Image (tube, helix red, strand yellow):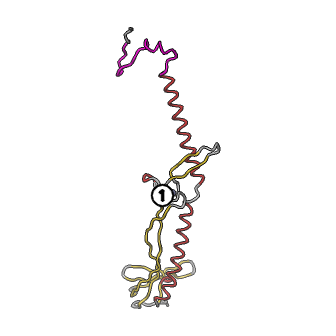
Amino acid sequence: MTKFQIGDTVYIARAGQEQVWVQCPECLGSGRLRVILGDETEVSIACVCCDRGYEGSPGRVQTYKFISDTTEHTLTGISSQLKGDDHEVHYHSGGRSIEEKDVFATREEALTRAATLVAEHEAEEKKRLGYKEKQHKKWAWNVQYWRGEIRRAKETIAHCEARLAVAPKNPRHADKEPTVVMGELTQQENG
Ligand SMILES: [Zn+2]
């Protein structure tokens, strides 16, 4: 025997959701984070919390606003499935399948359940946003990585400059040095 029968009018509880953007809790909208290193050097990196890959860090994060909602339905079907020791009942209406715990005889009861659903969703969303915050390890890694890249690039430049010997020790000799013009080796005329 199920709580409701086919043909009954019921009220379904749901938490409607709306996508909203809020200011990033980490960079407060700037999209950047300042990091002070051990030697007091200050560097600025793109905010890790609101990072959106190729889109960069916009300074805001996407989240959801949940709204208590109820809808009225006429039941067109009932199904039951054995889950452990219990039978899990689902009610059907217009192609929708709804769990028994979200189906009620009155709108008031459905609204109470909807408020619980909203609270549950809000807690989950808060947890999800929490994971994105305070990722100090990730920032540290980013700073370390880019500083390493800069150091390697500087070493490459120093190495290349040394190979080219761009600054002759005696400026007078510079006149006698062969000059490369568009890949063509020419001897400069003397006086
Ligand atoms: Zn941010």
- Is label 1 within 8 A of ligand 1 (CB to nearest ligand atom)? yes
Magenta stretch: residue 168 in it? yes
Q: Relative to the observer, which residue lies in front, 101 or 166?
A: 166
- Seen in the picture, residue 173 relative to 5 is either above or below; the reply is above
Query: In this figure, which residue is indicated by the disc labeled 1?
Result: 59
Q: Residue furthest right?
A: 38
The span shown in magenta is: 165-186
- Total labels: the figure holds 1
Residue closest to the far top: 191
Mark 1 falls on what kind of element?
loop
Q: Residue 119 falls in which quadrant of the image?
A: bottom right
Name which residue lies at 55% across and 43% down.
145
Report the side of 42 relative to 188 (left or right).
right
Please tell me which residue is depicted at 45% across the width and 15% down the height of the picture: 174
Residue 22 x %, y %:
48, 65
In-image side of 184 versus 174 (left or right): left
Residue 36 lies, in percent from the top left, at 60, 48
Within the magenta stretch, is there residue 89? no
Q: Position of residue 79 (x, y in %)?
A: 45, 82
- As drawn, 83 above or below 177: below
Residue nearest the observer in this picture, 79 or 19: 19
Q: Is residue 145 above or below residue 31?
A: above
Query: For the point 52% across and 54% down, which residue is it?
Result: 48
Residue 144 x, y percent position in the rendering? 58, 44
Classify 75 as above or below 118. below
The amino acid on which the numbered mark 1 sits, given as a three-letter code, is: Gly
- Residue toward you, 171 or 66: 171
At label 1, counting other C-alpha atoms closer than 10 Å, the crowd grade (few under 14, some 14-19, many 20 or more) is many
Q: Quadrant of the C terminus?
A: top left
